[in-house]
Image (cartoon, rainbow, N blue to C red):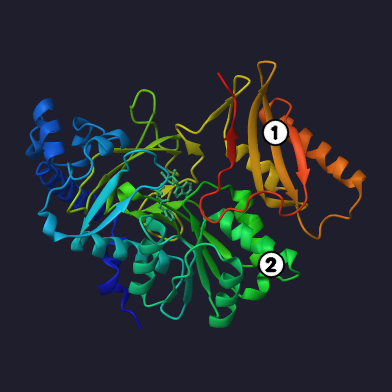
Amino acid sequence: MVELDDKIGSRFEWMSRGELAEWQSEALAKTVLQAAKSPWYSAVFRKMGIDPASIKSPEDIVKLPFTTKEDLRLSYPTGMLTIDPEDLIRLHTSSGTTGTPTAILHSRADIDCWAELMARCLAMTGANSKDVFQNMSGYGMFTGGLGLHYGAERLGMMVIPAGPGNTARQIKLIRDFHGTCIHATPSYAMHVAERMIQEGDDPKSLGIKRAFLGAEPYTEEMRLKLQELYGFKVFNSYGLSEMNGPGVAFECPEQNGMHVWEDAFLVEIVNPETLEPVAEGEVGELVMTTLRREAMPIIRYRTRDLTCILPGECPCGRVHRRLARMTGRSDDMLIVRGVNVFPSQIEEVIMRHKWIGGNYVIHLTKAEALDQMTVRVELAKGEFDGSIETVRNLRAQLHKELREQVGFNVNIEVLEPGSLPASEGKAKRVIDEREY
Ligand code: DLL
């Protein structure tokens, strides 16, 4: 049996607010001194007249500059490195970027710390060494594969490193080896369920107890739909390559916000326009500083993710504050006919309907200079009686609800099950073909 106390840092998990504050001050001071060893931050500090030794507590953080994705590109490949390159053991890059990637370099201590944080997340959900864990996330530069893998192994779970795709094999492996936990993007988890239903199979028959889903935004409605289809409990998982990857913030069994491990990350929520802190409970851009990174500390990283800190204490007793479900990014908001629309608002409506499958696409075009939004959805297998009349009614209903949600007319296309391209990783939900 794995002794949680020694192996996954329970001391930090159950710290009091006072102990955490003390730890954070110490860790931040060390982090800034460490960062000053890198060519990038030493130049930035010199230029801004910052004495790294003057940063002594989280209140001092405002004296430090923000770091952006662009800074990571400019300092590529090793501008933010603070240690001898021979002491590095791993490189990861951020997904979805074009041109120069952003590279994150890890020492042995960094990988060890990441595994510890990840194991802490998994144990928090109630998973333990008796579980069989199928990791459907990409292994490679993407952090979802190796990140979860190391954490699950540290907890002593039996790991099936399936990787993404090959849905028939995924199903067979879970069945044959009695998988009890899975890790995937929510869209892929939905795809697997729909595939099973289409083949007359029942996702519940797999017997999975827990699903760790993240790496892309999804709504509470999508969580409920997945839980209903599979009969498992879904735990939201948030992270980004710049802050290791997964293992930054994770839900506890309360399923009400994601505890962000504040012994490892200093959290700020700022107004993305003014960069000033917002009041507790208010939505803003998440900004994070690494507190336990050795090879490549990052200071005040602008994640572009919009969220808020949930006020109040979690009944679970952990004092690490909770991040609300991401509502989008400060840069993914769509402006359609002058109206601000987040894709999650559309998803919320779609997911309410039993007769619609989990896959959908939002297509933006222009007609006579007017923005047009078309939402394509698929009929859920088994929910459709085959009549044109039913499709017509369904389309009208969705049209009405979406109009209420966004305030303009949305074209609806209702397609046969399986018509839309299936996603194996992060789903591409929005196709914007408008010309300006
Ligand atoms: O997606 C790390 C990860 C892997 C997290 C597996 C969870 C599970 P990146 O490829 O660098 O890293 O993408 C990070 O994905 O800034 C968010 O915009 C988005 N994201 C990640 N998790 C969530 C989530 C990984 N639970 C970017 N909800 C982040 C909403 C998420 N968005």
* Mark 1 residue CB less than 8 A from any atom of ligand 1: no
Which residue lies under the disc numbered 1?
Answer: 374
Residue 3 is tagged as none
What is the x, y in percent for residue 355?
A: 78, 52
Residue 259, quarter of picture: bottom left
What is the x, y in percent for residue 230?
A: 64, 66
SS at mark 1 in the image: strand
Q: Between residues 60 and 291, which one lies in front from this camera angle?
A: 291
How many numbered circles does the render carry? Answer: 2
What is the x, y in percent for residue 35?
A: 14, 44
* Mark 2 residue CB less than 8 A from any atom of ligand 1: no
Q: Single out the residue that lies furthest toward the top.
A: 369
Amino acid beneath label 2: Met
Q: Single out the residue that lies furthest toward the front.
A: 99
**Depicted 156 relative to depicted 369: above or below:** below
What is the x, y in percent for residue 421?
A: 63, 50
In this rendering, position of residue 55 left or right of residue 253: left
In this rendering, position of residue 144 left or right of residue 292: right
Residue 247 visible here: no
Which residue lies under the disc numbered 2?
Answer: 196
In this rendering, position of residue 41 left or right of residue 228: left
**Depicted 63 relative to depicted 313: above or below:** above
Residue drawn at the location 33% of the way across and 79% of the way down? 2
Residue 348, quarter of picture: top right
